Image: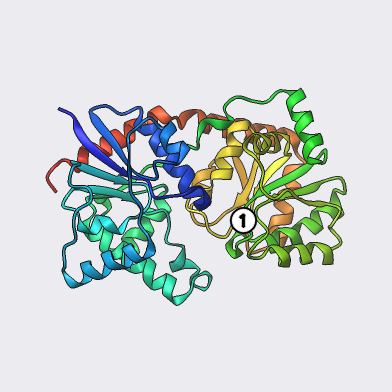
Amino acid sequence: MTTKLGVLVLARPENGGTYQYTLSMLQALRHTSGFDVTLYGDPTDPELVKAGFPVMPFSESRQRQLIALAANRLGVKLTDPFAAEDVLLAPIYSLSLLHTKKPFAYTLHDLQEKHYPGNFSIWQRVWRHQIHARLLRRARRVICESNYVRTDIVRYFGVDEGRIAVIAAPPQGQFQLEMDAQQLEAARKRMGLPARFLFYPAQFWPHKNHMRLVEAFRGVVDEIPDVNLVLTGKKRDEYQAVMDAIAKLDLTEKVHHLGYVEQQDLQATYQLATALVMPSLFESVSIPIYEAFQVGTPVIASNVVAIPEQVGDAGLVFDPTDVVSIRDTILKMLRDPEAAKRLGRNGRARMLAMTAERYGRQLQELLQSLQSVW
């Protein structure tokens, strides 16, 4: 018997990680059986069309979300937009789920606002708490990508651990075919990449911790003058403050900002990098770490939140609040190329185990559990 599965795909490309997560989930659903899948999202999104499932037009404006939340608080039932489905799966939250009778699972990516409230306005903190508190009451299962986030869900919302599924999504398979030397050299010239560099692909948000990285990098250059730092990310948020710090530390010639990078050039940058450095103060899961693993680039990362769980034996970790710790760990990697190669091999091995097929089997088990009596 076929089960009708509705998948709410509300993330957009500008949502970054949650959009890539959504695409990974859709890729994995191709490796499930017994489900008649319908996507609820934007039928003009080429990536959704490429997934190969029918797409029902669906969007959720902030106004629609507010109405759904207010109605739920007042005990008013709205029309169920998913009445045709048997079960529902949401890669990110949807407040329309508050008004369906269908069993559903949704992914709660992180509770960063509980750890770094200063990064959020009061309105944002209240909003995030309300949506998760209400959705968690209704969700038959909740998905997260690390044990750290599972602990947070239990701690802040009292959810029974048996209802939480820890399932890490593999990144898209775009880096699985390694680029040859000729392609890499062409990319190096095209982007003006230096011979030896650390790579940090991240938006200039406060928790991405660029300022401490730049300060630590000053100490790295003092010890190893030929190393460079390559950054990506849009020119917004703390971008100008970071550029000012780079100039103040006399690093303008050593730090290169690429801005937005196309997929092929991004892969080349990972492969050409001496190491990926990830000094973020908060990540439930870091996609760049997985992308570095895919091409065997060694990883140097923060020892906070879920990052050590993700890195395992495939990288070195440091205290992201301590400039000296960041500096010394980078120097340790740069001074031991054989250890760096070993860590790169370990990263590739970790990624070989994280396949779309394996993820599909995990989702299959989760979706089947939605149909059991709660």
Can I make out residue 123 in this image?
yes
- Residue 24: where, in percent of width, then height? 44, 37
In-image side of 147 versus 244 (left or right)? left
Compared across the picture, whether 256 is left or right of 55 comes to: right
Give neighbour class at mark 1: few <14, some 14-19, many 20+ (Cα, 10 Å). Answer: many
Image-quadrant location for residue 110: bottom left
* Whether residue 27 is situated above or below residue 66 in the rendered picture: above
Q: Quadrant of residue 53?
A: top left
Residue appearing at x 38%, y 32% in the figure: 28
SS of the residue under disc 1: loop
Work out whether 357 lies above or below 302. above
Name, please, the residue furthest toward the left: 373
Q: Report the label total.
A: 1
Residue 86: percent from left, percent from top = 18, 41
- Which residue is at a point 58% across and 33% down the rendered structure image? 294
Tell me which amino acid carries mark 1: Gln
Q: Is residue 159 visible?
A: no
Across and down, in percent, residue 36 comes to 24, 32
Q: Nearer the viewer, residue 69 or 322?
A: 69
Which sits in the foreground, 326 or 12?
12
**Residue name at image x 58 percent, y 43 percent:** 289
Which residue carries the number 1 mark?
203
Location of the N terminus (image quadrant): top left
Q: Is residue 320 above or below residue 343?
A: below
Please name whichever residue, 289 or 134, is drawn nearer the observer in this view of the structure: 134
Looking at the image, which residue is at 32% across and 63% down? Answer: 64
Q: How is the image coloured?
A: rainbow
The image shows residue 92, relative to residue 294, as above or below, that is below
Where does the image place residue 16, in percent across and percent down from the top left?
52, 49
- Closest to the observer, 174 or 369: 174
